[in-house]
């Protein structure tokens, strides 16, 4: 029964659309590199999404009976090369961010754009955490989406040993990155069967999360608007107190 559900799931429209890229390996490799670089530099799309997506494409290419190629002998995405490429790109970008932090980090965070990302309070907490856990923080940052970019930048700013950073981050990358790609590439049928069972629940959770996110944004916007209105009113009262209007002389 589970196998039938999996087969039905593979014929969903989105998967049939994705299947065309399973036979365009150079496009997939190029997109993988681009997305990994942008994710490492703070793109708000977790790299896990990209890794699982390309792993799924490798699975599709290895199963032409379910996802027929456009023509006989069409090239397919190679899962081993895909995993190796992702590993090299992720480690290289992590180390590049470390080097940027080591040589230009203090100047970089004073830039207006970066200052919005690195508030003084955030920097103080992150720096305290990094100093407390030392090189262990490098591995923690690698396994924590959302703080990888500022975390690796801080490791460079705090002058952590480049050899130790490379060793710990490299080990963490080798554990986390290729496994995600290869799991989908080799066991996609079982994973997609599970997705079939939980698809409705996942969509419901995502819908609730989206509604909650919108509600929080609207609340913050309304709160900021009211706070700004109060500040303007206080400023107006203070200005009035400092420069009162002169008395109007009586009319003769």
Image (tube, rainbow, N blue to C red):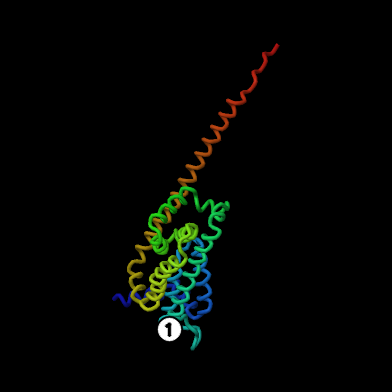
| Direction bottom: furthest residue | 72
Q: Position of residue 190 (x, y in %)?
A: 33, 75
Which x, y percent locates residue 68? 45, 83
Q: Please, what secondary structure does the residue beneath circle 1 have?
A: loop
- Residue 236 or residue 84, whichever sits in front: 84
How many callouts does the rendering have? Answer: 1
Q: Nearer the viewer, residue 104 or 90?
A: 104
Towards the viewer: 242 or 155: 155
In this view, 37 is above or below 128: below
Q: Position of residue 57 (x, y in %)?
A: 45, 76
From the image, which quarter does the N terminus lie in? Answer: bottom left
Answer yes or no: is residue 144 visible.
no
Instruction: Check the image and report above or below for 233 versus 32.
Output: above
Circle 1 packing at 10 Å, graded few (<14), some (14-19), many (20+), is some
Q: Residue at x 40, y 68 (%)?
A: 172
x then y, percent, for residue 117: 51, 53
| Outermost residue, left side | 1
Residue at point 51% right, 41% down?
225
Q: Which residue is mark 1?
A: 64
* Horizontal relation, residue 217 to residue 108: left or right: left
Q: Residue furthest right?
A: 252
Can residue 222 be spotted in the picture?
A: yes
Where is the C terminus found, in terms of image quarters? top right
Q: Residue at x 49, y 81 (%)?
A: 23
From what the image shows, is residue 247 above or below residue 121? above
Residue situated in front as seen by the camera: 93 or 208: 93
């Amino acid at each position: 029964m589970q196998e039938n559900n999996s087969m039905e799931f593979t014929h969903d429209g989105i998967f049939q659309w994705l299947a065309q890229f399973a036979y365009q390996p150079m496009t997939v490799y190029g997109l993988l590199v681009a997305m990994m670089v942008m994710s490492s530099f703070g793109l708000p799309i977790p790299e896990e999404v990209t890794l699982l997506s390309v792993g799924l494409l490798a699975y599709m290419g290895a199963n032409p009976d379910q996802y027929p190629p456009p023509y006989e002998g069409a090239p397919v995405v190679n899962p081993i090369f895909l995993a190796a490429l992702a590993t090299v790109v992720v480690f290289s970008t992590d180390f590049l961010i470390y080097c940027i932090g080591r040589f230009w980090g203090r100047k970089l965070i004073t830039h207006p754009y970066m200052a919005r990302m690195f508030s003084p309070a955030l920097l103080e907490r992150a720096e305290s955490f990094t100093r407390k856990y030392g090189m262990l923080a490098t591995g923690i940052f690698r396994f924590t989406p959302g703080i990888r970019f500022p975390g690796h930048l801080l490791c460079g700013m705090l002058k952590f040993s480049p050899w130790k950073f490379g060793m710990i981050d490299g080990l963490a990358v080798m554990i986390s990155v290729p496994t995600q790609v290869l799991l989908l590439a080799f066991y996609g049928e079982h994973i997609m069967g599970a997705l079939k069972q939980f698809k409705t629940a996942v969509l419901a959770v995502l819908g609730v999360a989206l509604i909650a996110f919108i509600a929080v944004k609207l609340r913050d916007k309304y709160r900021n608007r009211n706070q700004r209105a109060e500040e303007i009113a206080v400023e107006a009262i203070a200005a009035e107190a400092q420069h009162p209007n002169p008395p109007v002389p009586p009319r003769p």
